[in-house]
Image (spheres, rainbow, N blue to C red):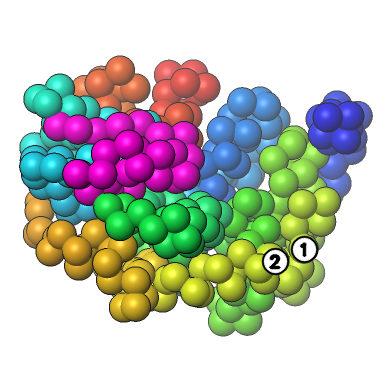
């Protein structure tokens, strides 16, 4: 606790702000973070208002709920309508709108068996208590969450729980960053890389940022001084014309990541194409269960497909997640779309960029 408080020290932050201003020396810098926790930390700490005016902060596709595709929500709704199926999900997925603005919350109100769990392991308790039903855990999230789901699959296997399966819609961060940079309209000049995801991945999977695109990538922590240090390093790399991928969060992230967690992931999952809200299909950016675990794969076991669905009318989450616009540029922001009545997923989760702008920005 004391250590974390040290990274909130105002004098330390002011000296880092001075260092950032010196590195920028009047130049502009557009950086993107790709982690919902960074989005909230930057707003909540007041950092956003302290940053030099020449620094543009963009929130990318780093909030698991925000990137959950309309077609994936349609599949949840289809599942919710089936007999003898119990859906186990994290609570923030409940209000994510799919086709026609419908969500699992609506399905639940109409009698669907949708249970909120706080850990994937809770879904096993549900499965044990309901042996005549099939419990489907909705697996969303990034490299941070997926190992806990793999561990749950292992536990289900060890306990012989045959009525448990996972709808794996996990997503991988590095392929999404590549797609963003390949977009000619992408104006991102540097990435603040996600601290949590990086505890699993380490640095190597991001090496292409500097090597192929000459874009700095800095793994950062979540306290104000962590974030400012990461911004200083990216500004200095840009000033010196020496982009690199570095770890500015060594108290939590090892440069090599967590090989044990990655081994568990590889035991149960393999890379697969995935749909991202507002971005579309990104090759090899998701995780599917390996064929040998077919009986625990909800897609196969319940013969599920992701339907073609039209995007939510008027919602510009895709442009927000790609850094093309900021939330207030969306005509629905703060009018038809608010946290109480979200039109799109970026307004649903507390970690969504539209919700963060709504809560913390002056309008
Ligand atoms: Fe979508 Fe609402 Fe954000 Fe607009 S303000 S992009 S409608 S979530």
Residue 48 visible in the snapshot: yes
Q: Is mark 2 within 8 Å of ligand 1?
A: no
**Viewer-closest of 63 and 19:** 63
- The quarter holding residue 234 reads bottom right
In the displayed structure, does residue 165 sit left or right of residue 97?
A: right
Q: Is mark 1 within 8 Å of ligand 1?
A: no
Residue 217 on image: x %, y %: 65, 64
Q: Badge 2 is on which residue?
A: 257
Q: Residue at x 15, y 59 (%)?
A: 302
234 shown above or below 77: below
Residue 245: image quadrant is: bottom right
Q: Residue at x 20, y 67 (%)?
A: 300
Task: Give SS at disc 2.
Answer: loop
Kindly report the distance in space between the C-alpha atoms of the residues bearing marks 2 and 1. Answer: 5 Å
Q: Quadrant of the C terminus?
A: top left
Q: Is residue 31 above or below residue 260?
A: above
Q: Residue 332 appears at what percent x and percent y?
A: 24, 29
The residue at the point 34 percent across, 71 percent down is 293
Quadrant position of the N terminus in the picture: top right
Q: Position of residue 195 (x, y in %)?
A: 66, 52
Would you place residue 22 above or below residue 332 in this image? below
Query: With 328 as the anchor, is 110 left or right in this view?
Result: left
Residue 52: image location, x then y, percent: 69, 38
Q: Nearer the viewer, residue 272 or 295?
A: 295
Q: Tell me where the magenta segment starts and ends, as one range.
A: 112-137
- Residue 88 among those drawn in magenta: no
- What crowding class fits label 2: few (fewer than 14 Cα within 10 Å), some (14-19), or many (20 or more)? some
Q: Identify the disc placed on residue 254.
A: 1
Callouts 2 and 1 close, C-beta under 8 Å: yes
Residue at 47%, 44% (x, y): give it. 121
Magenta stretch: includes residue 131 = yes
């Amino acid at each position: 606790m004391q250590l974390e408080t040290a990274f909130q020290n105002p004098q330390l932050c002011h000296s880092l702000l001075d260092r950032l201003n010196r590195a920028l020396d009047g130049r502009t810098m557009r950086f993107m973070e790709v982690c919902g926790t960074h989005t909230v930390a930057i707003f909540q700490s007041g950092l956003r208002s302290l940053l030099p005016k020449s620094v543009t902060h963009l929130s990318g596709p780093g909030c698991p709920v925000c990137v959950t595709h309309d077609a994936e929500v349609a599949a949840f709704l289809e599942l919710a309508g089936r007999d003898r199926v119990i859906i186990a999900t994290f609570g923030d997925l409940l209000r994510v709108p799919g086709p026609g603005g419908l969500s699992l919350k609506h399905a639940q109100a109409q009698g669907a068996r949708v249970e909120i769990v706080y850990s994937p392991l809770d879904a096993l308790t549900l499965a044990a208590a309901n042996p005549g039903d099939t419990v489907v855990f909705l697996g969303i999230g990034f490299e941070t969450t997926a190992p806990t789901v793999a561990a749950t699959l292992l536990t289900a296997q060890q306990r012989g729980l045959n009525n448990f399966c996972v709808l794996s819609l996990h997503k991988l961060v590095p392929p999404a960053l590549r797609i963003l940079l390949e977009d000619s309209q992408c104006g991102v000049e540097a990435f603040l890389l996600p601290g949590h995801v990086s505890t699993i991945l380490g640095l190597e999977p991001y090496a292409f940022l500097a090597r192929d695109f000459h874009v700095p990538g800095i793994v950062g922590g979540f306290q104000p001084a962590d974030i400012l240090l990461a911004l200083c390093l990216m500004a200095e790399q840009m000033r010196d014309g020496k982009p690199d991928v570095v770890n500015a969060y060594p108290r939590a992230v090892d440069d090599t990541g967590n090989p044990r967690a990655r081994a568990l992931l590889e035991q149960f999952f393999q890379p697969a194409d995935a749909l991202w809200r507002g971005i579309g299909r990104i090759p090899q950016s998701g995780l599917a269960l390996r064929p040998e675990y077919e009986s625990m794969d909800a897609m196969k076991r319940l013969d599920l497909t992701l339907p073609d669905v039209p995007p939510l009318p008027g919602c510009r989450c895709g442009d927000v997640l790609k850094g093309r616009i900021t939330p207030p540029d969306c005509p629905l922001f703060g009018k038809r779309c608010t946290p109480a009545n979200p039109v799109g997923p970026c307004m649903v989760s507390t970690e969504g960029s539209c919700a963060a702008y709504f809560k913390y920005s002056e309008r």
